[in-house]
Amino acid sequence: MRSVKKIRLLTVLAALTAVTSIGLSGEASSHTRADGTMRNAGNGFCLDIKTYNVGEPVILWPCHGGTSQQWQR
């Protein structure tokens, strides 16, 4: 159970780093939207994770509402 929490924490930290580095603006830059997504202001794509492996980068992907695009504080 501890490794699952560690993976989730590392994923969240990577997501926060990506949000800062890709330049999301407006509401998405500080927290998730009501639907749990973080959207790029320029193209509307969502912050997503390709796999749940530690060290994998987060990506911008067309929004589809899947669990890989739902973030929480």
Image (cartoon, rainbow, N blue to C red):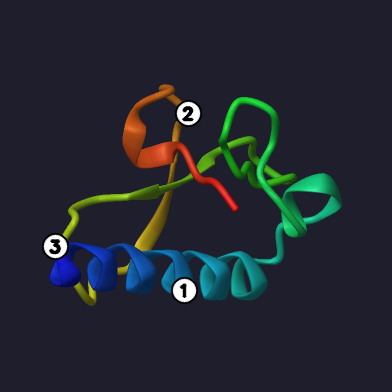
Could you say whether the residue bearing mark 3 is in a helix, strand or loop? loop
Q: Which mark is residue 63?
A: 2
Residue sitting at x 64%, y 35%? 44
Left or right of 4 on screen, residue 69 = right
Q: Which mark is residue 1?
A: 3
Q: Comparing marks 2 and 1, which lies closer to the viewer?
A: 1
Residue sitting at x 54%, y 76%? 17
Residue 19 higher or lower than 41, as above or below: below
Crowding near the residue tagged with mark 1, few <14, some 14–19, many ≥20 C-alpha atoms within 10 Å? few
Residue 7 higher or lower than 63, as above or below: below
Label 1–label 3 contact, CB within 8 A: no
Crowding near the residue tagged with mark 2, few <14, some 14–19, many ≥20 C-alpha atoms within 10 Å? some
Residue 32 higher or lower than 30, as above or below: above
The front one of 70 and 47 is 70
Residue type (three-letter) at the residue carrying disc 1: Leu
Residue 22: image location, x then y, percent: 61, 67
The quadrant holding residue 41 is: top right
Left or right of 22 on screen, residue 33 = right
Label 2–label 3 contact, CB within 8 A: no
Residue type (three-letter) at the residue carrying disc 2: Cys
Residue 18: image location, x then y, percent: 53, 69
Residue type (three-letter) at the residue carrying disc 3: Met
